[in-house]
């Protein structure tokens, strides 16, 4: 931990993100004899997948990796929000209300992913939340006992969230998967290649076996009436409406690439480009886990371990054995991406008065096809709110092909004082080099 007056830390390797990929990277690099600092904005390590208040409530694999992190000797700073970065492995953060500069020889980006929230009429109503957001709130103690809940969206995340809601006592009414039935069936049949994933999926489904699980079904709109949400579902051929108290819906995940883009790493098709060593196109920067593609927790652990070993200069041994395992995870991810690709009808739900930037209340009618992200900001303030385009940027990219705007400092809301301190420290480090 830095002392009360310190503003600069030095380490061999800094890991940004303490989810599975970041934990594995820190454990591997520390085990290779390197000094490691881990920065994470959450109050505890574990990321979204291992978010917890009580470690004993986590599955055994999570407890094992968190215990390994505890024993690794890595310095873990939770509550550290990264707001700036630069070449030469320099990271700027806000930690305990102060500016913190971390200087290292290598940076491992394990920044995870965020939900893709695609607008539709009523998506901003109270009681409508993301699938992953519902998962996070459940882990934080949200009480859903007796509440009528529907889960709608796409991808394997629907199953564990539905299972968690059912376990927490929710009156689960519907699980709707937008992917066509034939694509889901083809993906399910392919799971014989990964028996553990097959058994896991079966266990999730068994936990809400009496609940309808419909493929080829998506939410068309939501309205509030008499204190309850009226959700209109559609299959494209027929539509019907049902009341709920909570609707959990999202269109999958998109990699969090803001930090990577800020330092100039190449991002292609929404993913940070890495080589076989998990190294990005910027020297001294590596990436692992969701930033390089939605491949799941097991793949994140493998990629994090490879990145940690490679950044520590120990990639020729253990990392080489892990690369075949990484390839298998990527093949699974490719099958999942093909099965759960977004159907074009999701674009057709948006009406002229549908809000597409909820921070700034920008309707779809204000957006022009062909605009860049910067043009949208100048003309409508879309992307200028507190989320800085993290939500509407990904949505508008899908809806109208709008290219993301340039990433700028700060990456997250912070104080002017912290920014000023970080700028002065950057100037000092550049002057000394």
Image: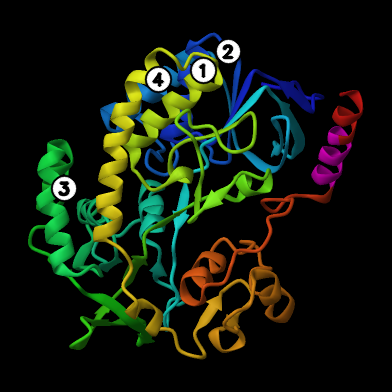
Say the numbered circle drawn on residue 201: 3
Q: Mark 4 — residue? A: 319
Q: Position of residue 63 (x, y in %)?
A: 34, 26
- Classify mark 1: residues with Cα within 10 Å, few (<14), some (14-19) or many (20+): many
| Front: mark 1 or 4 | 4
Whether residue 190 is situated above or below residue 315 in the rendered picture: below
**Which residue range is magenta in the image?**
417-426
Q: Identify the residue at horizontal 20%, vertical 51% (top origin).
A: 167
Left or right: residue 22 compared with residue 95: left
Q: Earlier in the sequence, mark 4 or mark 2?
A: 2
Could you tell me if the residues under marks 3 and 1 are in contact, i.e. CB atoms within 8 Å? no
Q: CA distance from mark 4 to mark 2?
A: 16 Å
In this view, the residue in front, 380 or 314, is 314
Of badges 3 and 1, nearer the viewer stands 1
Of residue 335 and residue 349, the one placed in the foreground of this image is 335
Q: CA distance from mark 3 to mark 4?
A: 29 Å
Predominant SS along the magenta part: helix
In the rendered image, residue 251 lying in the magenta stretch gets the answer no
Instruction: Choose mark 3 or mark 2, whichever is in front.
Output: 2
Indicate which disc, 3 or 2, sits on the residue closer to the N terminus: 2
Which numbered dot is residue 34? 2
Please tell me whether residue 425 belongs to the stretch shown in magenta. yes
Distance from label 3 to label 1 (Cα)? Answer: 33 Å
CB under 8 Å between discs 3 and 2: no
Q: Quadrant of the C terminus?
A: top right
Q: CB atoms at circles 2 and 1 under 8 Å apart?
A: yes
Counting residues from the N terminus, which is met first, the one under dot 3 or under dot 1? 1
Give the position of the N terminus as an image quadrant. Answer: top right
């Amino acid at each position: 931990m830095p002392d009360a007056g310190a503003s600069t830390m030095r380490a061999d390797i800094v890991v940004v993100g303490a989810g599975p990929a970041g934990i594995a990277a820190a454990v591997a690099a520390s085990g290779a004899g390197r000094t490691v600092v881990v920065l994470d904005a959450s109050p505890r390590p574990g990321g979204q997948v291992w978010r917890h208040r009580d470690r004993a409530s986590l599955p055994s694999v999570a407890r094992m990796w968190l215990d390994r992190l505890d024993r690794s000797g890595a310095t873990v700073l939770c509550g550290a929000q990264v707001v700036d970065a630069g070449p030469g492995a320099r990271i700027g953060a806000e930690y305990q209300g102060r500016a913190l500069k971390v200087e290292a020889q290598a940076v491992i980006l394990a920044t995870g992913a965020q939900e893709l929230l695609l607008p539709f009429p009523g998506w901003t109503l109270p009681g409508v939340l993301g699938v992953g957001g519902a998962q996070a709130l459940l882990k934080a103690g949200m009480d859903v006992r007796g509440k009528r809940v529907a889960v709608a969206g796409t991808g394997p995340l629907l199953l564990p969230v539905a299972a968690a809601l059912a376990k927490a006592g929710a009156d689960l009414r519907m699980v709707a998967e937008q992917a066509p039935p034939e694509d889901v069936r083809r993906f399910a049949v392919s799971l014989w290649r990964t028996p553990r994933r097959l058994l896991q999926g079966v266990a999730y489904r068994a936990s809400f076996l009496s609940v309808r699980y419909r493929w080829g079904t998506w939410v068309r709109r939501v309205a509030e009436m008499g204190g309850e949400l009226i959700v209109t579902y559609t299959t494209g051929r027929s539509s019907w409406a049902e009341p709920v108290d909570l609707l959990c819906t999202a269109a999958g995940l998109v990699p969090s690439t803001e930090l990577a883009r800020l330092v100039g790493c190449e991002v292609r098709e929404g993913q940070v480009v890495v080589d076989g060593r998990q190294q990005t196109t910027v020297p001294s920067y590596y990436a692992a886990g969701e930033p390089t593609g939605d491949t799941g927790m097991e793949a994140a652990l493998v990629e994090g371990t490879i990145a940690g070993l490679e950044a520590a200069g120990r990639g020729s041994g253990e990392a080489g054995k892990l690369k075949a395992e990484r390839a298998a995870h990527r093949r699974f991810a490719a099958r999942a991406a093909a099965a759960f690709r977004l159907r074009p009808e999701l674009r057709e739900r948006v009406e002229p008065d549908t809000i597409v930037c909820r921070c700034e209340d920008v309707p779809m009618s204000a957006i022009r096809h062909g605009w860049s992200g910067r043009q949208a900001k100048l003309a409508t303030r879309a992307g200028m709110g507190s989320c800085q385009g993290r939500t509407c940027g990904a949505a508008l990219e899908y809806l109208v092909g709008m290219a993301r705007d340039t990433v700028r400092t700060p990456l997250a809301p912070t104080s002017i004082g912290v920014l000023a301190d970080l700028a002065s420290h950057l100037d000092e480090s550049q002057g000394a080099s």
